[in-house]
Image (tube, grey):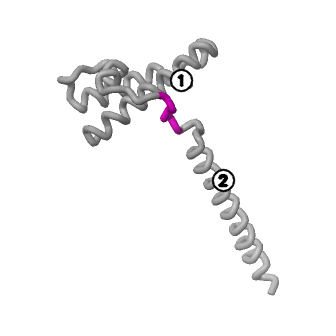
C-alpha cells in the first residue's frame, strides 16, 4: 500500500497543475478577445487600399513578397519593445505606428493570401 502513495500524490498534483494551466489559457484567450496586447484592430474608420500602401511605403506595382519584406522591416523598426529606451512619448508613437502597420499588412494578407 505504501508503494502507491507517491503515485497517487503525483497524479493528484498533475491534476491540479493541469487545471491551473487550463484556467490560465482561458484567461489569456479572454484577455485577447477583449482588446488585450495582441489585438490591434482599432475602432477608427477603415482605410482605403491607397492609405494602406502609404503606411507600408509600397506602390501598386509591388509584389506580395515586397509587401511582406517592407512589413517586416517597418515592424522591426517601430516595435515598441525595440524603442523603449528612447522615452515614453516615442514608445507610444511607435505603438500607434505598429498597430497601423499591422492593420495594413492584415489588409494585404487577406487580398494576396500572404
Question: In the image, is residue 26 above or below residue 4?
Answer: above
Q: Is residue 96 left or right of residue 71?
A: right
Point out which mark residue 62 bears.
none
Nearest to the observer: residue 17 or residue 61? 61
User: Which residue is outermost to the front?
Assistant: 45
The mark closer to the camera, 2 or 1, is: 1
Image quarter of residue 85:
top right
**Relative to residue 60, is residue 28 depicted above or below?**
below
Sequence-wise, which precedes: disc 2 or disc 1? 2
Q: Residue at x 53, y 38 (%)?
A: 38
Instruction: Give the residue at the far left of this rendering.
Output: 61
Q: Position of residue 113 (x, y in %)?
A: 27, 42
Indicate whether 80 appears above or below 27: above
How far apart are the alpha carbons under marks 2 and 1? 26 Å
Residue located at (70% from left, 73% from top)? 11
Q: Which residue is mark 2?
A: 24
In what element is the residue under mark 2? helix
Q: Which residues are magenta?
A: 39-44
Q: Secondary structure at mark 1?
A: helix
Examine the structure image and report whether residue 40 is included in the region drawn in magenta: yes
Tag 1 residue: 95
Foreground residue, 47 or 37?
47
Q: Position of residue 62 (x, y in %)?
A: 21, 24
Amino acid at each position: 500500500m505504501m508503494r502507491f502513495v507517491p503515485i497517487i500524490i503525483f497524479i493528484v498534483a498533475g491534476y491540479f497543475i493541469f487545471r491551473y494551466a487550463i484556467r490560465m489559457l482561458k484567461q489569456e484567450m479572454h484577455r485577447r478577445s477583449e482588446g488585450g496586447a495582441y489585438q490591434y484592430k482599432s475602432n477608427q474608420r477603415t482605410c482605403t487600399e491607397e492609405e494602406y500602401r502609404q503606411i507600408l511605403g509600397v506602390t501598386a506595382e509591388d509584389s506580395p513578397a515586397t509587401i511582406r519584406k517592407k512589413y517586416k522591416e517597418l515592424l522591426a523598426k517601430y516595435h515598441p519593445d525595440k524603442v523603449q529606451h528612447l522615452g515614453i512619448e516615442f514608445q507610444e508613437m511607435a505603438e500607434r505606428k505598429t498597430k497601423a502597420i499591422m492593420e495594413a499588412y492584415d489588409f494585404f494578407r487577406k487580398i494576396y493570401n500572404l
